[in-house]
Amino acid sequence: MENQDFKFKLKGKALVCIDWANVYGWQEGLDWKIDAQKLIKYLLTYPEVFKINFYFGTDITKKSRDFINSLKQKENDRFFVRTKDVKYVPVDLDKSYLKLRMVEMRQTLKNRNVNNKITEELDKLFSQPLARRKCDFDIEIALDVFNNLDNFSSFILFSGDGDYAPLIEYCLRHQKQTIVVALPGNLGKEYRVISRGLYICNIKKLRNFISK
């Protein structure tokens, strides 16, 4: 799928929105890593691209803050970082799939006569309060598209999240060239019902431009 000569054929001014959490997750299905700064640099080579919005949450770790700061230093009149603090939402183990998995894991260890210390550590782990990471940018991306609708002819979305399907359909109804860049195995089933006008671009086609 990698193509040294690949190039988007844009039909006028283009808005690019990158949901980095989604893009970052694709790396589990790739044998290479995606370099955020190379991705931005590549997109800026297109004169049609008038705005690139990069969406990613700022976590409490130094690594996360350093990453966001390194990107903010690259901001210019065409590239912008959209961020907000990551929230941690409590997970109720008694009402979750995790509770069932914990019971299954403990029974499996018991059946295999695994050292009691391991099962004790497992019990201790699940007795602690758990939380899941939450930092969605669906609303921010939708608002940026709405607010810029009269300013672009082409829209490129880097995300395979099916929740964006209504936004994609909205752009198509307004006669916008619409491109979704994704990893096929991570593409939401909601896109299957969009039969006309949408171009799906496999992220692998960009490997030579954006890989670490």
Image: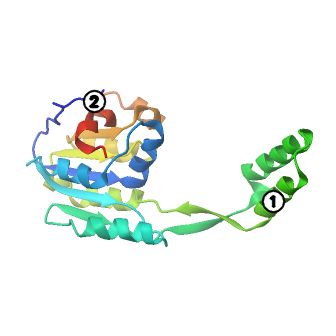
Quadrant (top left/top right/bottom left/bottom right) for the N terminus = top left
Would you place residue 133 above or below residue 173 in this image?
A: below
Question: Residue 38 got which mark?
Answer: none
In this rendering, would 23 be left or right of 157?
right
Image x and y of residue 147, in percent: 24, 61
**Quadrant of the image occupied by residue 62:** bottom left
Whole-angstrom CA distance, mark 2 to mark 1, is 45 Å
Image x and y of residue 19, in percent: 37, 53
Q: Residue at 24% of width from left, 64% of height from top?
A: 80
In this rendering, would 91 be left or right of 39?
right
Mark 1, secondary structure of its residue: helix
For disc 1, the neighbor class at 10 Å (few under 14, some 14 to 19, many from 20) is few
Image x and y of residue 132, in percent: 60, 61
Q: Amino acid at mark 1?
A: Glu
Q: Is residue 161 visible?
A: no
Q: Which residue is mark 1?
A: 121
Which numbered disc flags the more N-terminal residue, 2 or 1? 2
Image x and y of residue 67, in percent: 36, 65
Q: Residue at 41% of width from left, 56% of height from top?
A: 138
